[in-house]
Image: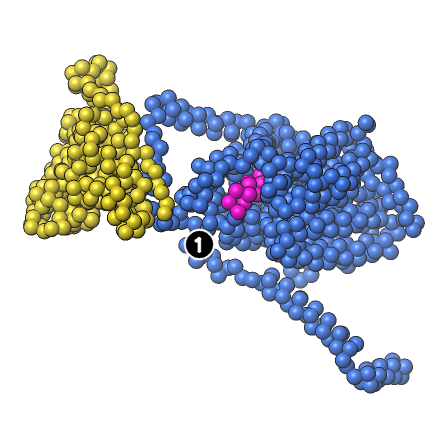
Amino acid sequence: MNQQNFPVQVAPLESCREPGPEERSMLRKVLDRVGQYCQSRSLFVLHYCTGCGAIELPPSMTSRFDLERVGMQPMVTPRQADILLITGYLSVKTLKRVILTYEQMQSPKYVMGFGSCTINGGMYWNSYATVKRLGDYIPVDTYIAGCMPRPEAIQQGFLDLIERIDGGRAVAWKDYYRNYDRYLGHQQHLFGRDWLTPTDVVGEAAHYRLAGDGTLGPHTALLDQYAGYHQAWGVPREQYAELEASS
Amino acid sequence: MIPSLDLLLALAFGNLGLMLLAGRNPTAGLLSMILYALQGWVLVMLMPALAEGAASGLAFQVFGWSLSWELNGLGWFFAIITVGAAFFSAWFAAGAWGVQGTRSPWAFHVTLAANVAAMLLLLASRDLLTLFIGWELVTWAGYAMMIQSGGPATRAAYKYLIYGVAGGLAVLAAVVLIQVQAGGLGFAAVAAWMPGISTGMLWALMLLLGVGFGIKMAFLPFHRWQAEAYGESPGPAAAFLGAISSRMGLFGLLILLVHFIGLARLDELLLPLIGLDARILWMWLSALTIIIPTFIALKQNDARMLLAWHGIGQGGYMLLGVLVGSELGVAGGLLHVFNYATYQAVLFLVMGAVVYRTGTAHLDRLGGLITRMPLSYVAMLFAIIGLAGLPPMNGFVSKWMVYKALLDEGLPLLFVAAVIGTLGTILSVFKLIHNVFLGQLRVEHEQIREVPFSMWGPMIALSLIVFITGYMPGLALDLVMVAQTSLGFAALDYHLGGFVTDTGNLNMLAVVSVLLLGMGIGAGIFLLGGNKSKRVHQLDNYAGGHFLTTEVRYHYSHHFYAGLLRLIGPWYITLIKRLEGGIAALTDTLAAGSDGLYRTAYTPILMLAATVLGLALVL
C-alpha cells in the first residue's frame, strides 16, 4: 500500500477582507484596469466535451465565427487555460474528472456551463447517474442555455464573459476558495466521504489570500482523515471498508 | 624537491606501491589524492622546461637496447589530463563509495595508480621501444581496472584484452619492421627516415600502427569492445577510463600521422583506383567514428553504455580536428581532448552516484531523481550541455573550432557529418537526463538522499571546470598550445575569451555574458515581480482528467524516440558485428583444422602429403 500524504491542511487560516473596488488607490485602479483589459483579450479555453454539444464548437472556433478574433484559443492543458468550457450533461463519473481539472487550473479561472443539462439536468433530469446542477460542485461564471445552443449563442456567451472579465465582475473562482467547504460537501454527498483530489485547494486559498470563514469546515476535516487511504491510491475496496467502519 | 620527470615517475610508481600495501586502509583514497595532486604540481612546474624536453635520468641498457624517457609538450598535455582525471576519480572513491560502493577499494586504488603510472610512462616515451613497453603496460593496467566488478565486466574486459593484444602485436610488428629497415627506433630518427621510404612500406606501417593505436582509441571499425568494457566498470573507474584511457590511442595516432608521416605526405598518398588521398580517408573514418557510435548510443537503455558509446564518438572529433591541419582545427581537436575528459568524467561519476543510491543505471527504471539528488542533477546538466556542444559549456568551444576549421578549409561534407553527430548527441543526452532525473519519481526511490560530499564534491568541481573553461576557453587553450607547438603546428591567436582568425573570431566572454544577462533578466522578472509560483504534488498532474496514482507509470521512458527509430532503425546494420563474427569463425575453423591435423588425422596421409610435396619441390 502506497500512502500518499498531500498537504491538505494549512493551519491556521485567517479570514481576509477583500478591499472594495472603490477603496483602491488611483494607481492601483489604473493598473487593474489595464490588467483586466489585457486578460479579457487573451483567453485560452479548455474544452470538456464528454456530453453532447461539442459539435457546435468547430464552427465557433474556425473561420465561420472565428473566436480568435476576440483573442480566444483552444488550450490542451488546465495549467495554461483560463476558461473551462463544459458542454452538455455530466455523469457522476465525469464530474470527478471535471472537478480535478478545474482544481488544477490556475486562478483566475472561469467556468462556462453549456446547454440546459449543466443548468438543471435538461432532458436527463430523471437519470440517476446525471448531475443536475453543475453550480453546486464548482462555481460557474456563465451559463449558455439551450438544447443545444447554436454557435451564435456560444459566441454571445463568450462575449458576455469577456465583458464581465473586463469589468472585473467575473469573480466566481474566488467563491470556490471562500466557500470550499460547501462545494466539498456537495461533492462528498455525491461521491462519498472519501472523495479526494490530489490538489491542495485549502493551501491555494491561503496562497491567494482568499481563505474565508467558509473555507474550512466539517467537510474539509474529512479530507485529512482519508488523505492516505483513498481508493484512487490503490487501496483495495475491502480494506477501505474496514477503515470506513473504524472511523 | 626539484620538479623533474624522475620525480613525476617516482611519485606515480610510489603511489602504486603505496596502494598495493595500504589500499585497504580507509585513508588510502585521501593519500592517493594527495599523490595525484603532487604529480599535477610537478607537471605544472615542468611546463617551462618542455620546450627542450624534460628528460628522465632513468636509463637502462637491456640486451644492447638503451631505454630512456623524455616528456615533450604533447605527452605533457595528455599527462596533465590523466593526472587530473585520476585525482577526481580518487576523490570520488575516497569516502563512502570506497566503503559501500565497491567490493574492493584496494583493487580500485591499485588499478587506478597502475593505470596512471603506465600512462605517464607511455606519454614520456622518446622512442618506439619505450612506447611499446608503455603501450603493453597500459593495455594490461586497463584490463585490470575493467575486471573489478566481475560478472559481465569480466567478459567485456576479456574482449578488450583480445583487441588490445592484437593491437599490441600490430604495434610490435611495426616496431620490428622499422628497426630492421631504419636501424633506429628514436622518434626523431624515425621521423627523419620516413620521407625516404617507398609508398608500399608507408602503407604497411600506417596500417600496422594505425590498427594498433586505432584499437585503443576505438576507431572505426575497431570500436566494438569499448562501450561494454567501460560501461561495466564501476563508477569512478569508468570515469577515469572514459575520460582519458582511450586517448592514449589518439596520442599514438598523432605521433604516427603528424610527427612521423606528416600531413603533407598523407595528401600525396593516393588510394588506388578511387583517387582519394590518405588524409581524406582518415578524416572520413573519423567522421564515421563520430556518427555511427553516437547513433548507437541513442539506442542504449543503460546510462553507462550510452555514455561509453558517446566516448567513442567524441574521439572522432579530436582526430578530425587535428587532421584538418590548420591552427584552428588542431587547436579545436586537442582542446576537445581536454573538454571531453572533463564532462565525460562528470557524467560517469554522476551515474556512479545514481547506481550507488538506486542500484541501477537502467534508463527504464529511474526517473524524477531531481528532487532527491539535486546536486547530481546540476552536475549532469552542466556536463550534458558540454557533451552536446552547446554554449555556455566548454564542449561548444572545441566543437565550434572544429566546425569552423572544416568550413574554412573547404570541407563542407565533413562539417555536415560532424553536425549530424552533434544532433545525435543532443538527442541522446536529453534522453539521459530525462529518464534519470526528470519525470516521475518511483515509489522505491522516495526515501533516497543526495550522495555525501566525497561523491558530489568531485562532480560539482569538475562541472564548474566545464563551465569556467567554456566561459574562458583561453585557460584551457594555454595547455593546448603547449601540445600544438610541440606537434610542429603554429600557435593559434587566442585570448582569454576565445580566438581570432582571419575569417572570424569567437569571444565566449561576450557570448556567455549575453546569455547570463538574458537569464538574469528573466530571473529578475520572475523573482522580483512577486513570484507567485506554488509547488504542487507530483500526482497533481494533468492526464486528461485521469486520477494519477503511483501504480500508473506516466513517465515515458521506455523505447524513447520511437518515431525517430522507426525512421532510422533500418540503418542500424550490424555489418561490423558480422565482420567480427566472420573473423572469429574463420579463426575457429583454421584452429580446428590445424588441431585436427595434429591430433586425429591419419599419419600415413600426412606422410604421403609431405612426400608428394617434397618430391614436387625436388623435381
User: Does any portion of residue B503 appear in the rendered image?
Assistant: no
Q: Quadrant of the C terminus of chain B?
A: bottom right
**Residue A72 lies in the magenta stretch:** no
The residue range painted magenta reads B346-359
User: Does any portion of residue B374 appear in the rendered image?
Assistant: yes
Q: Is residue B141 left or right of residue A147?
A: right
> Residue B458 appears at what percent x and percent y?
60, 34
> Residue B560 appears at what percent x and percent y?
44, 51
Q: Amino acid at mark 1?
A: His
Judging by colour alone, the chain drawn in yellow in this rendered image is A
What is the chain identity of the residue bearing mark 1? B
Foreground: A128 or B572? A128
Q: Residues within 10 Å of mark 1 (few under 14, many from 20)?
A: few
Foreground: A99 or B134? A99
Judging by colour alone, the chain drawn in blue in this rendered image is B
Which residue is at 36% across, 49% downward? B551
Which residue is at 26% across, 43% downward? A246
